[in-house]
Image: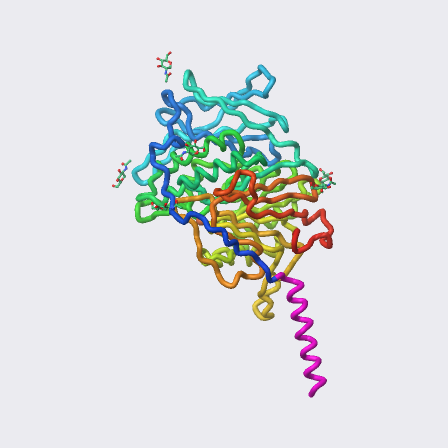
Amino acid sequence: MEVRWGCFAGVFLVGLILGFAEISSGGITSSYVRNANLSLDMPLDSDVFRVPPGYNAPQQVHITQGDHEGKGVIVSWVTPDEPGSKTVLYWAENSEFKNSADGFILKYKYFNYTSGYIHHCTIKDLEFDTKYYYEVGIGNTTRQFWFITPPRPGPDVPYTFGLIGDLGQTHDSNRTVTHYELNPTKGQTLLFVGDLSYADDYPFHDNTRWDTWGRFIERSAAYQPWIWTAGNHELDFAPQIGERKPFKPYTHRYHVPYRASGSTSPLWHSIKRASAYIIALSSYSAYGKYTPQYKWLEKELPKVNRTETPWLIVLMHSPMYNSYVHHYMEGETMRVMYEPWFVEYKVDVVFAGHVHAYERSERISNIAYNIVNGLCTPIRDQSAPVYITIGDGGNLEGLVTGMTEPQPSYSAFREHSFGHGILDIKNKTHAHFGWHRNQDGYAVEADSLWLHNRYWNSFKASSVAAL
Ligand SMILES: *[C@@H]1O[C@H](CO)[C@@H](O)[C@H](O)[C@H]1NC(C)=O
Ligand SMILES: *[C@@H]1O[C@H](CO)[C@@H](O)[C@H](O)[C@H]1NC(C)=O
Ligand SMILES: *[C@@H]1O[C@H](CO)[C@@H](O)[C@H](O)[C@H]1NC(C)=O
Ligand SMILES: *[C@@H]1O[C@H](CO)[C@@H](O)[C@H](O)[C@H]1NC(C)=O
Ligand SMILES: *[C@@H]1O[C@H](CO)[C@@H](O)[C@H](O)[C@H]1NC(C)=O
Ligand SMILES: *[C@@H]1O[C@H](CO)[C@@H](O)[C@H](O)[C@H]1NC(C)=O
Ligand SMILES: [Fe+2]
């Protein structure tokens, strides 16, 4: 009797110790007290929504990567009165010779709204790591901007990405963009994790709020690519007013180079940029087995060459790990489908939005469950990504405050404040992530960690303190 009890206790103790070794119990729920006042959308006559002067002047100018490698740029803009010119003139800094590329024009109606003339023009075969100027418009209402192409993809190419999600167009949204712009660690490309304008929160999804949003973000998105992920606020599915085609405004306005990565839909695609391979997924498109998105991702992950692009980054809107009450477990079905692949292919970090708050996970996985074995608890896993929720851009719905208690052991840090992130890739083994809340000075990191590349690091080097 005594022997059996001792044995049992021994097993219990070992289990307890292993349990603590696998998952630290000390996640942080930040005690920062922010201003709880809900910020409204900036009024239509705000400076950030100003229409550029001149007849039919191009507005809402924005760029994104235009090919798979980073030598292409898609330039998009809207002309309000007439189609105008489809041409983009562009020239390298220190070059007199002006090249031109021709785009095409789209227009759409949504309930009783009619869009302006939406232009998309892909510029191809640019030089890597070069500053280009570009010009859109015609006659005396032309406008000039510039961008810098990324370095050629390669393992030790430093590059800095910004992260913003669920932005909207409130005063808080404006603070987020301002803090991103003034962050002394300059983001070179923005990874946007979905929920752009929140026009759908207006009666009849008033699409003029898509236009104001386009004018609002121009001050950043005309000069550096914003990489798009679709969120639920991009669905604009409203059969009650005759709008039955999901993603209509979004897919007309925001183009991505999806064909270059073999995708059949603009809602999921991948790009290489410097030392990163970025995969954007759609939480609101079918992702189960046999679906187009599933088949694409299944082929896509083995293609990633970590010698060329060591950093594998996944973007999606709905987080797979989220310990807030709001949207709790909404990402669960996609987690069941794709988490085993993320671990198998050693994804470094998964960024999501949707939950209007910030949260960072430990490196954990939960992929052992098979219906009958009962193994359904996240465990420490050094092949697993870090999951970061950054849906705190500052939209009119405000922050979510309710958290599941106690803080689950997989959750390393959580706080509901508005802000943005910076992923600063140093070389093929080290990247630094910082989360910046809007109430702090531009250089302050309210949460940060060193990411050690999952492919190029010996896992033994990782510790709880520095994952
Ligand atoms: C929140 O709004 C109220 C009412 O407008 C105002 O009195 C208060 O000062 C605001 N709080 C902060 C911290 O700005
Ligand atoms: C554009 O140029 C024409 C001809 O010079 C002039 O009449 C017109 O006022 C100009 N428009 C703007 C917006 O400057
Ligand atoms: C669209 O319809 C709504 C509701 O009838 C109305 O308030 C709004 O002014 C209309 N907008 C346009 C552009 O006609
Ligand atoms: C938005 O932020 C910019 C940059 O800080 C500022 O110039 C502008 O006045 C702000 N606009 C509003 C409506 O807050
Ligand atoms: C992976 O990339 C490296 C560096 O660009 C290259 O030398 C190698 O051939 C690539 N491997 C495959 C399988 O394509
Ligand atoms: C990579 O970057 C980290 C952080 O800056 C640095 O400590 C490390 O020495 C670098 N590795 C190489 C091989 O340069
Ligand atoms: Fe969302």
Along the viewing direction, whichever of 242 and 175 lies nearer the viewer: 175
Question: Residue 264, image x and y in percent?
Answer: 52, 42
How does the figure colour the protein chain or chains? rainbow
Which one is in front, 463 or 274?
463
Q: Is residue 321 magenta?
A: no
Q: Residue at x 69, y 88 (%)?
A: 1
Q: Position of residue 261 (x, y in %)?
A: 58, 40
Q: Is residue 9 magenta?
A: yes
Q: Observer-nearest residue: 173 or 106?
A: 173
The quadrant where residue 82 appears: top left
Residue 54 makes an appearance in the image: yes
In the rendered view, would you say 312 is above or below 362?
above
Question: Residue 409 appears at what percent x and percent y?
Answer: 58, 61
In the image, ligand 3 is in what quadrant? Answer: top left
- Is residue 229 visible from the viewing direction of this image? no
Report the magenta stretch's main SS: helix
Q: Tally the numbered discs.
A: 0
Q: Is residue 438 above or below residue 10?
A: above
Snapshot quadrant of residue 262? top right
Residue at position x 60%, y 17% from top?
95
The answer to which image quadrant residue 85 occupies is top left
Residue 349 percent location from the top left of the image: 60, 48
237 relative to 7 in the view: left or right: left
Magenta residues span: 1-24
**Residue most extreme to the bottom:** 1
Q: Is residue 457 above or below residue 82?
A: below
